[in-house]
Every structure is written in C-alpha cells, then in structure tokens.
Amino acid sequence: MAAGYLDILRARHAARLLAGTLVGRLPNGTAPVAIVLFTRAEGGSYALAGALAAVYGLATAVGQPLLGRAVDLYGQPRVQLPAAVVSALGMALLALVGLGSLPLAYAAVAVAGVFTPPLEGGLRALWPSVLGGEERVHRAYAMDAVAQEVMFTVGPLLVTVLVSFWSPAAALLVINALGVLGALSVVLSEPSRTWRSAPREAHWLGALRSPGLLALLGSFFFVGLALGSITVAGVAYADDHGRESVYGWLMAALGLGALIGGAVYGARQWAGAPERRLRVIVALLALGYLPLMLTPGVVAMTALAAVAGVFLAPAIACSFIVVDRHAPRGTVTEAFSWLVTTFGVGAAAGTAVAGPAVELGGTSWSFAVAGAGGVAALLVLLATGRVLAVPGRTAVSARGSENDRNGAVEPGFSSGHQA
C-alpha cells in the first residue's frame, strides 16, 4: 500500500504540489474556528461569531466556481496567487481592525471568502500532467482525499497552538501568510505555469451544462449535509455525557476512519465504471451513518464514528473521477470547484438542520439527519443512473495537449487520449 503512494510522491513536482496545496488551503480549512476564537477574544458573542463564519462560508461558496472558471480561461498563476493575496488581505483587515465596525468586519470576511483560491480543483487539474499513468492519477485522487482529512484535523490544532502562544489576531495573520506562501509554491512550479485547459465552448452555464455533473453535485450536497449535521450532533452527544473531550474523540474517530478508508481504497486499481462504484460506496456510507442514531456509550459510539468515516474518503476520491468524466471540455477546474461549493453548502445546511433537530427530538434526531442525508445522496445517484452512465464527453484532448486535465480517466476505460 505505502509503496504506491511513495511512487506518486517521488514523481517530479508531486510532493511540492501536494504540500503547497495543503498549506495554501490552511486559511480555508481553519477559517471557522479562527473566526470564532477571534470574535470571542474581541468580546463578540457566539451569535456574531457564527454569523461572521457563515458569511465567510457563503462567500467561499460563491467565489470558488467563479475563480475556477477564471483558472480554466486564464491559467493558474494569473488567478490563484492574486486571489490568495486578496483573501489574506481580507483576513488581515479583520485581524487589525477588529469588531469596532461590524460592517467592515463582515466585508473583510466576505472578501476573504470570495477570493479563496481554488487550489483544490487546481491540483486535480495538474495530476495527469505530473503523473502520466491513469492508475497513478487514480491513486493520487485517493491520496488527495486522505490529505484533506489530515489538513482538517491538523489545521484547527495549529490555530489553537498559535492562539495559545500569541493571540487570535496573530493566528489569523500567520495562517493566511502561510496560505499565500503555499499558493506561491504551487504557481511557481513548472506544471502550474505550463498547464492550459482544453479549448472550451462558450456557454454561460460553463461546467453546469453537464447533466451528469449536476447529478453528482445533487448527491454530494446531501453527503455534505450528513457530515455537517454530525458536527452538531457530536456536540450534543458530548453535552449528554458531560465531557467536552467526548466530542474530540468522536471527530478524531471519524477522521481516522476516513484516513484508513481512503488509504485502502487508493492502494488498488478498480475495474468497472466509477459511476456504478460510487453508488456502492455511497450506499455503504449511508449504512455507516444510520447506526449513529443509537447513541450508545462513549466507547461504542467512538467505534461507530470510526466505521461511519471509513467510506467518506473513498466516496470523495471516486467523485473526483466522475467529475473528470462528466465535466465539459475546458471546464475541469470550475467543475471541481462546484463540487467543493456544493459539498460546503450541504455541510452548512446540515449544521442548520441538526440544531433544531436536537431541540425537537434530542441527540438521536440530530444523528438521524446524518443518516437521512446519506440515504438521500444514494437516492439521487440511483434516480440519475442513466444520466451518470453517459460521460459528458467521449473524447478528450489531442496527444499534443499533455497538460489537458480532461485526459485523466478511470483505469480500464479508454478516453481517446493515448498516453
């Protein structure tokens, strides 16, 4: 298993691109906790902290597909680095001005969110030109999904350490400075500088004109909803058991399950259509969420959380391949950015729904939201099976366009691109 991942990391530019992307995404991955800690330190209420974090999340959801389209049109360096700088300046403004002017604080987080660079989609656009072989690209997608779990675990921890040693304002400044450095490392690399998207058909819908992509986005809205609801349900469960540390154990178990699942999934080459495989994985994901409604003792609940996380990273990794197969030519970064946006909006919706669920029916009901989200995600995939069975394009770039992201396909399937 480890040999396959080491093979990828030994490829020229691969380790740099992965590390640079993860560091570049630190501001986005840590923004909610950083904003809450900063707001509370400035004397703001939890309601204000939540509102500022919500504005940041909404702004990010709006900005990602727009910036993704800009990357497809103008290349990575001309979009990613300026966006990272502007986003960092927005957070720096919040850190330096504080909450003295609430309209200015809201504007600052909105700017930071809208200009969050689409590094996630950009990395997936680069893997084929860096790794070449389809099997290696497939494994890189799984490694990418696992790396996300690591970032969302380590990132908030880094923020708390910075807050402990300095201050919440300093944490905002340091994290966003690191984000700019990460983006700089990516855009100065040869693959990023030379990458060009395939020629695209001018259309105002861009990537969203693909029915298959729309079907996938609909499903992953509910996957995000399930995951978002678990964050609230986990807090309620910890409150029921009188120990805040219980929440940390549940989230750690969920992340550990995802790490194990993603590592195992990416260690082998899979035969068959990825769309069919995604339905199976999402079915298992939903099946893993349903037992959480039982809310047993802490040890058993931690084990259930680990099981629930096992199929998350495989589902994300498989969705990357499905996105690639259905994204219209020349829209791949935008398409991946839409996946990020839809997942994030779903997570926000899950958080919003799980809160009232706790009030109405207790902790079990909030975990029921996660189970319902997983089932709904599966139903969308089943209902749109015919649409997903037909990739949005049957041929990709010519042999000379080696940097065309759309050249990556699932092992076992021909795309018309000869490596």
Image (cartoon, rainbow, N blue to C red):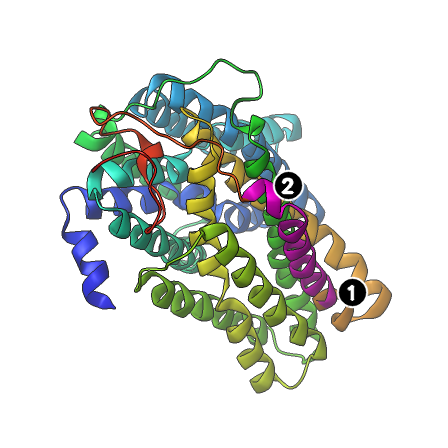
At x 52%, y 22%, the residue is: 206
Residue that sits furthest to the top in the current view = 202
Dot 1 corresponds to which residue? 358
386 lies above or below 254:
above
User: Residue 383 in magenta?
Assistant: yes
Q: Main secondary structure of the magenta part?
A: helix
Horizontal placement of 143 versus 185: left or right? right
The numbered disc on residue 54 is 2
Circle 2: element type: helix
182 lies above or below 290:
above
Alpha-carbon span between mark 2 and mark 1: 20 Å
For the C terminus, the image quarter is top left
**Crowdedness near tag 2: few (<14), some (14–19) or many (≥20) residues, C-alpha within 10 Å:** some
Are the residues flagged by discs 2 and 1 in contact, CB closer than 8 Å? no
**Horizontal and vertical percent position of residue 64:** 50, 31
**Horizontal and vertical percent position of residue 336:** 46, 37
Circle 1: element type: helix
| Residue 129 falls in image quadrant | top left
Horizontal placement of 93 versus 130: left or right? right
At x 17%, y 30%, the residue is: 190
| Residue 232 falls in image quadrant | bottom right
